Amino acid sequence: QVQLVESGGGSVQAGGSLRLSCAASSRYTMGWFRQAPGLPREFVAAISWSGTRTPYADSVKGRFTISRDNAKNTVYLQMNSLKPEDTAVYYCAARGSVVATTTAASWGYWGQGTQVTVSS
């Protein structure tokens, strides 16, 4: 059983930065998704176990960076140049396959979510 625990959410003004962390209990492909009120959960970024594959959603490319520290079993999402449209609950996810997917239903394990609010 994989347990995921997110931390690092909060409120920030537009242009600011936040770093999310996700502690994982096992070795999996990891990802971040987000969900705004009334909208479906959307893919943000993913990272392979080796860290060599890091796909991003077009909306966050150049602003967000996903990374992992396997010695600490922790995945990070550094979010810079935040925009009000980045406001959402951010979820950490894990997947047993070496291939990441943007489809939320294909990820087997989820954290409880952490709120990120960006004000204009």
Image: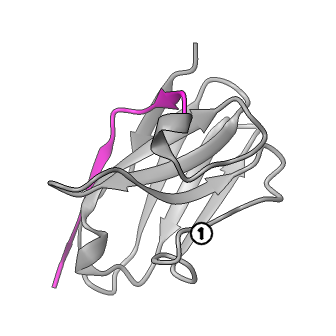
**Mark 1: which amino acid?**
Thr
Residue in view at x 75 percent, y 45 percent:
99
Residue 39 image offset from top left, x and y in percent: 23, 56
Mark 1 Cα within 10 Å, few/some/many (few <14, many 20+)? some
Element at label 1: strand
Quarter of the figure with the C terminus: bottom left
Magenta residue check for 112 = yes
Q: Nearer the viewer, residue 38 or 20?
A: 38
Residue 97 appears left or right of 57: right
Residue 51 appears left or right of 55: right
- Location of residue 20 with respect to 72 vertically, above or below: below
Residue 106 image offset from top left, x and y in percent: 55, 36
Residue in view at x 36 percent, y 54 percent:
34
State the residue position of label 1.
65
Residue in view at x 59 percent, y 67 percent:
56
Where are the magenta residues, as a range? 107-120
Residue 98 image offset from top left, x and y in percent: 78, 40
The colour style of the image is one colour
Residue 36 appears left or right of 8: left
